[in-house]
Image: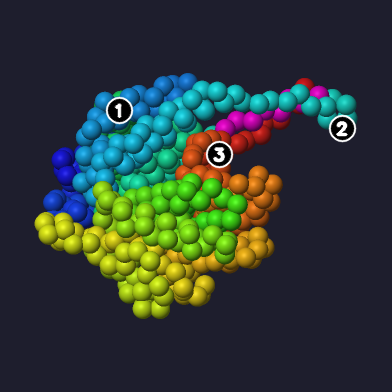
Amino acid sequence: MASPVRHYVGGGFDASGVPFPLVDPVTGSAVGEVPQASREVVDRAVRAAREALRGPWAAWSPAERSRLLHRIADGIERRFEEFVTAECADTGKPRELASTVDIPRAVANFRSYADLLAGRSERSWHTTTPDGRGALNYTVHKPLGVVAVISPWNLPLLLLTWKVAPALATGNTVVAKPSELTPGTACLLAEVMAEAQVPAGVFNLVHGTGADAAGQWLTEHPGVDAIAFTGESSTGTAIMRAAAARLAPVSFELGGKNAGLVFADADLEQAVEGTLRSAFTHSGQVCLCTERVYVQRPVFDEFAAALAAGAKELSGYGPMVSAAHRDKVLGHLARATADGDVLAGGGVPHFGDERDGGFWVEPTVLAGLPEDHPAVRDEIFGPVVHLAPFDTEEEALTLANASPYGLAATVWTGDVSRAHRVAPALDVGIAWVNTWNLRDLRTPFGGVKASGIGREGGDHSLDFFSEPMNVCVKL
Ligand code: TXE
């Protein structure tokens, strides 16, 4: 951790609060500390955000806000290597991943909403009323107000900016609370905001844990008008309960147990390569990762052998983000390896150096478990994928859809008609065909069932973060 972890409230930095240790997931050693924001700090942040809504920020035009978002993106690009170093220090993810995905996507988050906003024109209609007289109807888009943004530890800067960018684009003010495990890039973002002359109080940052701490106090705060959250489904339930008291709108990106379907007519090499990426990117700590693959029986053995071989050859992967998460993943593995077949991995890699103190888990391929087994049903959020055979298309869809989650899915097939039959029939928010995590930021992003509420991305985010108002003028 380069720079100290500090709150950013009303345009000023402060590190007040009971500190708790920040741990390097690669070695398990304490490398810094994070201040627990007190209720007073959270309250001060919300009041600063409310104050800023009434200040000069309210008069900023969409064009001025669009230019500001580009300035923030420029600021991240100027300090690109610092952001990569901070993201890798907190998450343990390989530098190659942070420098090609996490940080560039944070820049893209700001630029895509800046461009979308610049192109967004207000609509108005001239209508004829029943008495034949005319009326002019026009829509005014107002900000929601003070928005709480609560983000997780797996893609810290990417997921924080995925919400902050559209919230600012639409004229809101923000109080952000990043995961207590990965505060580094959020601190750098606050510095970039200050450098970009974001008006004081428009963006605020408080650190701390969730339940009975900064996260919960923020979601319960009467001064918070809306909540955008990414994290566990169970946490979503807790936050929705806090929001219910005020009927505050929520946008939730939650957990997943994403399925992959491999048909016998697929390009198997492409399906194996694609599944290695979709199962083991960031050691499976991405909500879009594949955790269960259903393979049509004629190619099951060939696919399973190739995927297991690929998993065994993986190198340069990172650890789990914390000891607690490592223990959760290993707990799943202990039961799964006792109840099923391990085709690759299944344990902890041995390095013979300081990494042996870190939170590492081997890339693991399982098979032979029943569909109601916890490792096939529950989200593991680690480098673990389970394979099972199927015979017919209908059976594949039944298996894939039999989950309380519905975030993402992959379909591997060489038959274009089958692709267009199967993909829309999957109960998920996003289905990829013969690829994974290919993203256009304007598309609707989000899950169904326990995987979330609402959609983010493109106009979906601009719509969530604004209140459209109709004004009708009798002519
Ligand atoms: O979640 P948690 P984690 C999911 C992923 C996995 C989880 C990983 O599937 O399940 O997120 O992130 C704060 N009131 N996704 O373990 O515990 C907490 O401090 C208010 C899906 O961190 O929910 C942290 O800042 N806040 C996603 C944040 O919530 C609370 C993509 C997340 O913590 C709180 C990425 C409370 N009671 C991960 N309890 C997708 N679908 O896009 C905790 N927090």
**Hey, which residue is sitting farthest left in the picture?**
353
Closer to the eye: label 2 or 3 = 3
Along the line of sight, the residue nearer the viewer: 438 or 264: 264
Q: Could you say where residue 360 lies in the image, as x and y percent from the top left?
A: 24, 60
Task: Tell me if mark 3 has few (under 14), some (14-19) or many (20+) residues whose alpha carbon lies within 10 angstroms of its own.
Answer: some
Task: Tell me if mark 2 has few (under 14), some (14-19) or many (20+) residues whose alpha carbon lies within 10 angstroms of its own.
Answer: few
Q: Tell me where the magenta segment starts and ends, as one range.
A: 134-141
Residue type (three-letter) at the residue carrying disc 3: Thr
- Location of the N terminus by quadrant is top left
Answer yes or no: is residue 276 visible: yes
- Location of the C terminus by quadrant is top right
Determine which residue is flagged by label 3. 443
Q: Is residue 138 magenta?
A: yes
Determine which residue is flagged by label 2. 130
Which residue is depicted at the point 49% across and 63% down? 301
Q: CA distance from mark 2 to mark 3?
A: 39 Å
Determine which residue is flagged by label 1. 77
Please say if the residues under marks 2 and 3 sit with CB atoms less than 8 Å apart: no
* As drawn, 335 above or below 352: below
Residue type (three-letter) at the residue carrying disc 2: Pro
